Image (tube, helix red, strand yellow):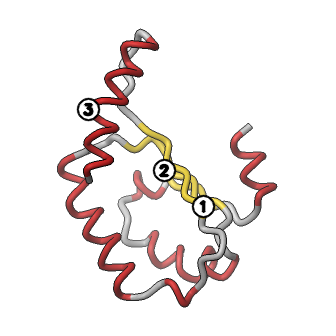
């Protein structure tokens, strides 16, 4: 949450001034390489749930998009569809799940 506060209050303000336009959204890239089902446990779910619960009212609509890169096939096809179902449809559209470096390169170009 401290990082989000820094990004929204300092980085976005500096970028707004530098670019001469309002910068109020961010692109998040998360590298899931090496993550498997053994990592998806109650502690992780509780942590991510807490972050979502606290950050949503404090930093509404600051997310432009999230790229979940190098996501293992099993996680992207078994866990993500279930997790995604708990998100608002508008939020769901902000996520891009990529399972390979090739997919990531194509998406980022």
In the displayed image of the protein, which residue is found farthest to the top?
A: 20
* Residue at x-position 36% and y-position 28%: 12
Tally of numbered tags: 3
Badge 3 marks a residue whose secondary structure is helix
Q: Which mark is residue 31?
A: 1
- Looking at the image, is 59 positioned above or below residue 98? above
Front-lying residue, 19 or 107: 19
- In the figure, is residue 90 to the left or right of 69? left
Q: CA distance from mark 2 to mark 3?
A: 22 Å
Dot placed on the residue nearer the N-terminal end, 1 or 2: 1
- In the figure, is residue 39 to the left or right of 77? left
Q: CA distance from mark 3 to mark 1?
A: 25 Å
Query: On the image, numbered disc 2 is attached to which residue?
Result: 94
* Residue at x-position 77% and y-position 46%: 106
Mark 3 vs 1: CB contact within 8 A: no
* Dot 2 crowding, Cα within 10 Å, few <14, some 14–19, many 20+: few
- In the figure, is residue 89 to the left or right of 58? right
The spot of residue 48 in percent (x, y) is 35, 70
- In the figure, is residue 94 to the left or right of 98? left
Q: CA distance from mark 1 to mark 2?
A: 16 Å
Query: On the image, numbered disc 3 is attached to which residue?
Result: 9
The quarter of the picture where residue 89 lies is bottom left
Badge 1 marks a residue whose secondary structure is strand
Q: Which mark is residue 60?
A: none
Q: Quadrant of the C terminus?
A: top right
């Amino acid at each position: 949450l401290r990082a989000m506060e820094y990004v929204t209050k300092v980085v976005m303000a500096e970028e707004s001034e530098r670019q001469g336009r309002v910068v109020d959204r961010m692109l998040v890239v998360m590298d899931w390489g090496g993550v498997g089902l053994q990592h998806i446990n109650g502690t992780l779910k509780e942590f991510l749930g807490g972050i979502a619960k606290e950050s949503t009212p404090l930093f509404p609509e600051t997310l432009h998009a999230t790229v979940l890169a190098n996501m293992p096939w099993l996680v992207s096809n078994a866990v993500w569809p279930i997790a995604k179902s708990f998100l608002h449809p508008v939020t769901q559209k902000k996520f891009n799940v990529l399972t390979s470096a090739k997919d990531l390169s194509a998406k980022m170009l």
